[in-house]
Amino acid sequence: MIPATTPLAPGVLPDAVIRSPNANAYFFAVTLSPTLSAEGVQAWLKDVTALIAELKDYESNGAPVVSVCTAFSASFFLAAGQPRFGLAPAQIPAGLASPPEVPALAAIPQVAGDVLFYVMSLSEAAIGAFERGLSATRAAGLQSVTVELGFQRKDKRENFGFLDDLRNAQGEREEVAFVNPELSPEEPAWVAGGSYLAYIKIAQNLEAMAGKNEEEQNAVIGRRKADGSRLDLPPGTPVADEGPFEGNACPATAHIRKAGPRGVLHDETKIFRRGVPFLTMREDGSIEAGLQFVSFQRSLSAFAVIFERWMTNTNFPTENAGEDSLLAERLITLEKAGFFFAPPHDERFIGAPIFDAPPVDPCTIGHIVVQKQLIGRNGQPILSELGGISFEVRREGAAVGEQFSTDSTGRAVSPPLPRGVPLVVHEISPPTGFQQAEDVPVTLTTARELVPVVNHQSPEGPPPIYTG
């Protein structure tokens, strides 16, 4: 759990504005001048912080009418692979410095912008004030802006007509959305309480979906359009009562089975979705519609598992299942995407902790965080299950503390361990189809240390299948 005293990134968790069915969404992607200095960018961020604070002037009867999440892309921290603004490499969010590989997203245009403002508003006047204020910062460093729009919906249905947001992180939202340093030792200390934001603009082919009968549409999504119940369960079954998928009534390629498989291991891999639909009319009177997909997560690896290892993996949840039906049948098209980091709140100005010196860590106890990697016979990573693999830490041949196991992102956190003494990370048993991982010697020098543990595919026998 994240300590209650940890400041969290603002504008991530739902508030009255975000929840309102009357709210409109605005995505402002801002590119800053490449010549901006460290002092200049901090002055610009202070101006933006003051601009957002001024939006309180538009409150209605004391209630806010605007909610803003500010997030930074890798290009804010890096230019041509080198740190900007005099930042040390260790101060850059690890998920942006070394983002996960998601081939399906790498092939589409990336969002052009150093800073993303995800704004939800009940007031057009307030948005006008925000736009005027942003425009006024051109002399201070703003170079260009692109804007995307979206909206909340009263009926809670997306543009294909299905109930949306039925299974999303609820009571554990803070644990899912915000960086916990105990689980992410590779991150700089200042990111604790921040959140990684994944964005995809998704166009929906409404005509193609409308050309299917309702039974066919249900099979694409995996739920009944009428009430949102899962196809392998009786009509009207509440989401809270859903367990693992049973039989083939819900196809293996159905969206909810590909993007949200059930089971002990898979249930641990969560993201907090907070996207909004968009819809505009073209000059010829046709409709352009889709989803401004947004998810918040403590690590981009959770997003990568869902998108790469599940949705686009043709061998998940069964061998030769194929891609998610939405993609395979070209009912959706990915138009652009981007990864960002929303910094924790700071009273000084947005992103102020980025520029602080790293704190001194006096603790004598630490944790090892294992990152499991599975390598195929061709030397490339293989899309097999990363979760449920157990480890123990040994000192002079004897186990230190209890065993610990990986989740579906391949992460496992050890019990508390002494620092400054030789330790060994030992895999209890290899995953099926892989050779035993070599023991990894570690001497902890920090509170948390990331330790990669690699398994290589067995030289003989069939390839391991990633099932769920």
Image: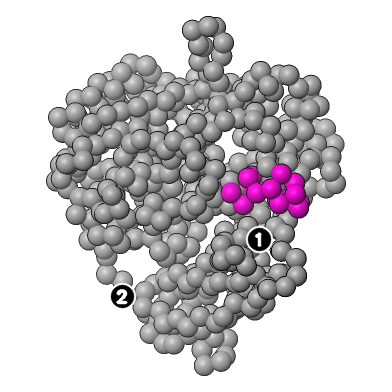
Front position in the image: 158 or 452: 452
Instruction: Say which amino acid is labelled 2.
Output: Pro
Q: Position of residue 345 (x, y in %)?
A: 33, 46
Quadrant of the image occupied by residue 33: top left
* Residue name at image x 78 percent, y 47 percent: 245
Q: Which residue is mark 1?
A: 385
Q: Is residue 465 left or right of residue 36?
A: right
Q: Secondary structure at mark 1?
A: loop
The reply to whether residue 63 is in sight is: no
Front position in the image: 289 or 70: 289
Front position in the image: 194 or 341: 341
Q: Position of residue 315 (x, y in %)?
A: 71, 51
Q: Which residues are magenta?
A: 308-322
* Residue name at image x 35 percent, y 35 percent: 112
Q: Main secondary structure of the magenta part?
A: loop
Q: Nearer the viewer, mark 1 or mark 2?
A: 1
Residue 444 position (above or below residue 25): below
Number of other residues with Cα within 10 Å of mark 2, as a class: few under 14, some 14 to 19, many 20 or more: few
Image disc number at residue 362: 2
Name of the residue lying farthest toward the bottom: 396
* Residue name at image x 29 percent, y 45 percent: 76
Q: Position of residue 128 (x, y in %)?
A: 31, 18
The reply to whether residue 212 is in sight is: yes
Residue 442 position (above or below residue 408): below
Residue 457 position (above or below residue 32): below
Between the C-alphas of marks 1 and 2, the distance is 37 Å
Q: Earlier in the sequence, mark 1 or mark 2?
A: 2
Instruction: Say which amino acid is labelled 1.
Output: Glu
